[in-house]
Image (cartoon, rainbow, N blue to C red):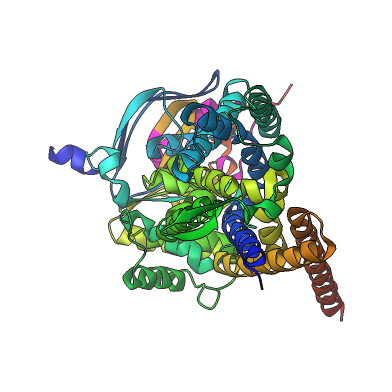
Amino acid sequence: MNSNTSNLALSIRHLSVMYDDKVVLKNVSLDIEKGKLLAIVGPNGAGKSTLVKAVLGIVPSVTGSFSIFGNHIDKMRKNIAYMPQRENIDWDFPVNVFDVVLMGTYGDLGWFKRTSSLHKQRAMDSIRAVGLEGFENRQISELSGGQQQRTFLARALAQNADVYFMDEPFAGVDIATENTIMSTLYHIKKEGKTVIAVHHNLDTVQKYFDDVVIINENLIASGDVSSVLNTTNLTKAYGKNFHSSYLKSLGPDSCAPFPSPS
Amino acid sequence: MDSYVVWTVLTCVLCGVICSLLGVWLVSMRLSMLGDAISHSVLPGLVLVFIVFQTRSSIPMLAGASAMGLMTIWLMRLLTNKLRIKNDASMGIIFTTLFALGVVLITRYASQVDLDPGCVLYGSAELVAIDTVYINGYEIPRALTIIVPSLVIIFLSLYFFHQRFLIMAFDKELSKSLGLFPNLYYYFLMGLVAIAVVASFESVGSILVIAMLTGPATAIKLLYSSIDKLYIYSVLFSLSGSLFGCLLGFTTNTSIAGCISIVIGIQFLIFSMIYLCKRHVQKLKIIQ
């Protein structure tokens, strides 16, 4: 392994994914640096979640290879954490906050081993870190949307990983939770770890993230937010008729190429 | 109390315990009807074991039934994924076809197969204590030679693999990303359901076994929302259902399996009343 690859948290080569007969991702190659907060943006159905799920092996890919710190993903499963999208969770399932967070430590499970008190301690620490102490025994359907999201953030923390994959962590949360999530992400970054988040709000990309990946079936651009997030790239991804207060903030020049919808 | 009553009650109680344990998972995963499908589709597996091996001993029967249970799930998934039809539609097609195959096999090979289609549907808890075998000189109902090993297998599996089942059932995606093979554990759990169904098959039949599988956990889930409580109270619910069901069956001299299902239904009704009252009280509290 050379020093160049080991500095890459994630490296994707020629990734293509199909659902039935529909191409979702086409020949995406991408390098993501270690220690960055990175947002994946693109229009609905652009394959943002699919990109993350393909890397983690949740959905099958037609072609492509990935490496995490230069290693095959199967060797690195204990070094990655995953926070799914809210809609994919059955909130009526009979588990409480502590049960859910403890699942973050299941990566250490042996064939017949059950979780130890050390793991339970790690789960409690994570619950405290997101400010949910006192809610451990609450059934997950009895939580507010923000508390539900923080429960899953705590679970990702309990995974104690080097790379955190998050699918829409800011979807449907109040401003207090958004702040908690953001400060947690900064904390993760401070420890030299990497966060790769699917994100839908273009207005907050610059505020929260260092790097951005813009996709719509194909990779459109990736790199530093300030150099990549511009009208040309976003128009390629979203088409000409989209509105973003972020783009307006870039000034009249950036908005100039937009024709009025006919 | 004579031994006939004791053996009959014990058999029904153990069947209830086995089914209620797995019912916790079926209900939590919203798969109640899958228990229905498996309880019917294991029939050809049992009949084939009779025809091919000419045996009613427990190991081949459990193996045949689990194999058929897993095949049901696999065929259902195949139909759903390849033909893109809805899950409940593929379930309806597969389990009726397999069950029908079982019925046809029973009637065709009636001389070799010691199974009565009526018993398959309604069970024959009344006959369990009469059909006995000798083990180490003790005379015990033959049904227990399949029920007790099933209980042990199911109890140990649920104990040792609890967390793997939990993460598979709750969050398949995280389970996959951790490399914990959720599909494997899904099939494992369904294999256990097939075992539970076969163990209870002769005593309570393939239709009433569904009451034992889904009744307890559905009732308890109205009031409690943790897996541990679901386990404990579902087993208690089922114990009471089997005991009072047997009592009702003996005193009225009718079908014991039928009586157990009726008692489970009545208990369920009581639980839903409690649930509705609880919700009403909560609403009143909010208004005040």
Q: Quadrant of the C terminus of chain B?
A: bottom right
Q: Is residue B205 left or right of residue B168?
A: right
Give the residue furthest to the bottom: B288
**Above-or-below relation of B31 to B6:** above
Image position, residue A260 (x, y; %): 70, 26
Question: Foreground: B259 or B142?
Answer: B142
Queried whether the magenta region covers residue A159, the answer comes back as no
Please report the residue visible at 69 percent of the width from the left and 69 percent of the height from the top.
Answer: B240
Say whether residue A219 is visible: yes
Q: For residue B118, which quarter of the picture?
A: top right
Query: In the displayed structure, would residue A157 be above or below residue A118?
Result: above
- In percent of width and height, residue B262 lies at 80, 58
Residue found at x 12% / y 37%: A2
Q: Is residue A236 magenta?
A: yes
Q: Locate residue A176, reporting x and y percent.
A: 57, 67
Q: Which residues are magenta?
A: A222-247
Query: Toward the viewer: A135 or B39?
Result: B39
Using the image as rendered, state which of residue B74 and residue A168 is in the foreground.
B74
Q: Is residue A114 above or below residue B72?
A: below
